Image (cartoon, helix red, strand yellow):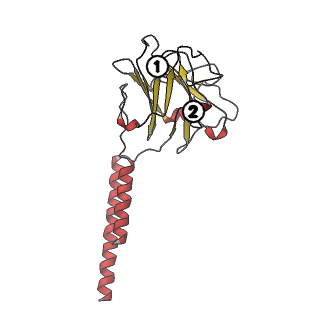
Amino acid sequence: MRKSILISTAIGALIASTAQASPTVDGNYDASYGAATASVLYNAAAPTSNFGAPTNENHLSAYNIYLQSDAGFVYGLLRADGATDISAVRFSNLYFDVDPANGNGSDIGFEITNQRMFAAGYAGYYNTPDLAYALSADGLGIEFKIAMGYFMGAQPGLTYDVGQVFAGLGDKVTLRLSQSYGYSVAGGASYGPDRLGSVILKGAVPEPSTWAMMLLGFGALGVTLRSKRRTAVSTAA
């Protein structure tokens, strides 16, 4: 009985691990994001192009940042408050640290609305047409979906720091800087060690056929255990 309970628990845990819904990339907030990982404040006097000294302010609009990951992708949503007219600046440039344990700052960046990436501090771009993004109907939301492979290895044509370390499955990547809805750069130590938010790169979820084989295996194991138990009871009798 105890072994059967353990098997049922294991199956439940495996199913539960795949149950979390992923956001729909449509520019709108999905409940699966949960709470915002960071908030950027509005201040008309906030400096622009302040990469060397990022703050927690934007000169055109306040906005919240949400991050999530699933098996294969990193998702994000930026949602402006609409207090000012941002119709001309609906863009987002984001800088990530793929090896935060090394404490060497941003490593790669993405121009979300241009669908291209770059290595922080170096010239050149790598086009990422598979980087999906969407604007909300009201123009206040910018949502994106990035394949985790871009965080895990060098891309052709880009120059990286010597000895650049990339993330692996189970590793954390951190959003350090956001230049969105205008040219002020949000980030910096005031946000804490996770800066504007961190996500874990998760492994692939088993395909349906793999699940079927796993469940059959658990079923066969259960039958074997029951058979052994009946044999033991019969022998004891």
Please tell me whether residue 169 is drawn above or below residue 183 in the rendered image: below
The answer to which of 85 and 174 lies nearer the viewer is: 85
Q: Which residue is mark 2?
A: 191
x, y percent for residue 15: 35, 52
Of mark 1 and mark 2, the one earlier in the sequence is 1
- Name the residue at 38% across, 55% down: 13
x, y percent for residue 108: 59, 28
Kind of residue at badge 1: Thr
Please tell me whether residue 231 is drawn above or below residue 204 in the rendered image: below
> Left or right: 47 with respect to 127?
right
x, y percent for residue 144: 43, 27
x, y percent for residue 84: 43, 13
Q: Quadrant of the C terminus?
A: bottom left
Q: Provide the secondary structure element on which disc 2 rests.
A: helix
The answer to which of 54 and 118 lies nearer the viewer is: 54
- Name the residue at 44% across, 44% down: 204
For residue 113, the mark is 1
Residue at far right of view? 162
Q: Provide the secondary structure element on which disc 1 rests.
A: helix
Q: Is there a contact, CB below 8 Å, between mark 1 and mark 2? A: no
The answer to which of 89 and 8 lies nearer the viewer is: 89
Please count the marks in the image. 2
Distance between mark 1 and mark 2 Cα atoms: 25 Å
The part of the image, by quadrant, that contains residue 213 is: bottom left
